[in-house]
Amino acid sequence: MTRTYRLSKSKIMSGLQCHKRLWLEMHQRELAQVSPESEHIFRMGHLFGDRTRELMGPGELVGHERDIVRALDETPAALARASANGTVVYEAAFSYRDVVSRADGFAPYLDGWHMIEVKAATSDKAYFYLDCALQAWVAEGAGYPVRRVTLAYTNNQFVYSGGENYVGLLRELDVTAKVAQLKVSVDGIVGQLQAMLARDKPDIRTGEHCSSPYDCPFIAYCRSQEPPPAEFPVEIFHRITARKLRQAGYTDALEVPETALGSPRNLLILRASREGVPYIAPSAQQFLRTQPYPRYFLDFETMSSSVPFWAGTHPYQQIPFQWSCHVETAPGILTHHEFLDLSGKLPAREFVRSLIETVGTEGPVIVYSTFERTRLRELCELVPECRDELHAIMRRLLDLLQVVRSGYYHPAMKGSFSIKHVVPTLCPELEYTSLNGVADGGAAQRAWWAAVDASTSALERLELRGRLLEYCKRDTLAMVAVYGGLCAGRPVRLSEYGIDAPAAADDECGHAQPVARDHNDVPAAR
């Protein structure tokens, strides 16, 4: 007799993303590696769910998040009370044909029930509809006819006015008809997945599906089981070009004929990779060399939340809480300035005041991407009395990323123009692996959340503060090095700026250990 497996809505969605992912979840779950990013998303989802329940009206929460058996036992009585009182049951649990599901909201409606599915997203997505259809199929199979289905998602135009007033946070979309169309396919989907799980592990290679619509926790395992990729895979080219080349059977970028590459940028990447030497456009060098002093190298770190908790902010708005600025007043002469607010209060006003004081009114303000420009524009709304000064700073912005994209490429970048891939080619002493705990923007945001958490100790908060300051400082120093390397046409040493090489992660006594690097391991730019 063929074994059947207890599936959940989330497991079915995993199986629709990739059969191998579901097979591993059911048979070799210990191979999963849940990233800190995914864990943070889960926590934000709980925050969003707690707030949206208040918007859907009075009701009863069926708890036992990790005990589906108890939740199934308690749901019928909760639904009976909701039917009698006209209230909502939150996280109602249902089971049908070895599939379990929990509805965000379930309320009496006409001669049946109204199911509400809530998503912490700013738009409706195609897979949300199938998600709703799966839940409706399970609930109806369990004996609760679903007459209406509402998809509720985040209204990104909502501006929080304060006072715990979140009316308007959700957009509601009636998806009853769409769900009815999709529901007929659920039976076949469940049968197909059950049959797949009874067989040997599917042989599926990694690809774009590994991160769409969700990051797969088995990606590291699956890659470890595959032959090592080419030194220069076709993914070093533009994503659309790479997809076409994969479809045409190419895996190694060095084997791609130049006639298959349309853009000058792709041709440059191919030629630099084949020749093993970097390229710097003379026009990029000339442009950067002629910029006046002082030069301000600026970077922001931000936090965001699906549920805004400061008046005047909206869902997922990136709120700057930290900046770092290296100021080059003359060739090789640097000073460093910084700001960090971990109070948990809206940091905008002091952030802006200190920034204006630091960057003054003259000299280019160098950033890496359009991120800071967008944040400055938003800060004009949060600190309107400083709008003129902020606009003046925006007029001085110089996007170093655009200069790099148009005028520089090194084979070691492997198609990436992230500063973390660019800086080692122009200043090998500078890297991010020595940073302890905070080494990217996502980690910085998670560190902010941890620092403002009331359960975090004073010592832990102090450690987080140090990590955040060091990371943001590293970013602006990296911009200094990239700028300097492009101007010089060669890799630079930090000693040229009077700076020692960055320290490694702390030892057990809390003392930083030096990092030894040889700047000769990267060829000079031609």
Image: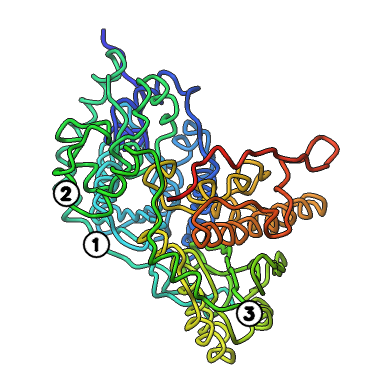
Q: Quadrant of residue 10?
A: top left
What colour-coding does the image apply?
rainbow
Q: x, y percentage for residue 206?
A: 32, 30
The residue under label 3 is 359
Nearest-to-viewer mark from 3 and 2: 3
Q: x, y percentage for residue 344?
A: 68, 67
The residue under label 2 is 180
Q: Name the residue: 46% across, 35% down.
A: 73
Q: Amino acid at mark 3?
A: Val
Q: Is residue 514 left or right of residue 48?
A: right
Q: Quadrant of residue 8?
A: top left
Callout 3–callout 2 Cβ contact below 8 Å:
no
The residue under label 1 is 174
**356 or 292: which is nearer to us?**
292
**310 or 246: which is nearer to us?**
246
Q: x, y percentage for residue 297?
A: 59, 68
- Residue occupying the far top of the picture: 1
Mark 1 vs mark 3, CA separation in Å? 50 Å
Mark 2 falls on what kind of element?
Answer: helix
In the rendered image, the vertical position of residue 195 relative to residue 14, given as above or below: above
In the rendered image, the vertical position of residue 87 relative to residue 364, given as above or below: above
Tell me how many marks there are: 3
Q: Is residue 335 left or right of residue 278?
A: right
**254 or 204: which is nearer to us?**
254
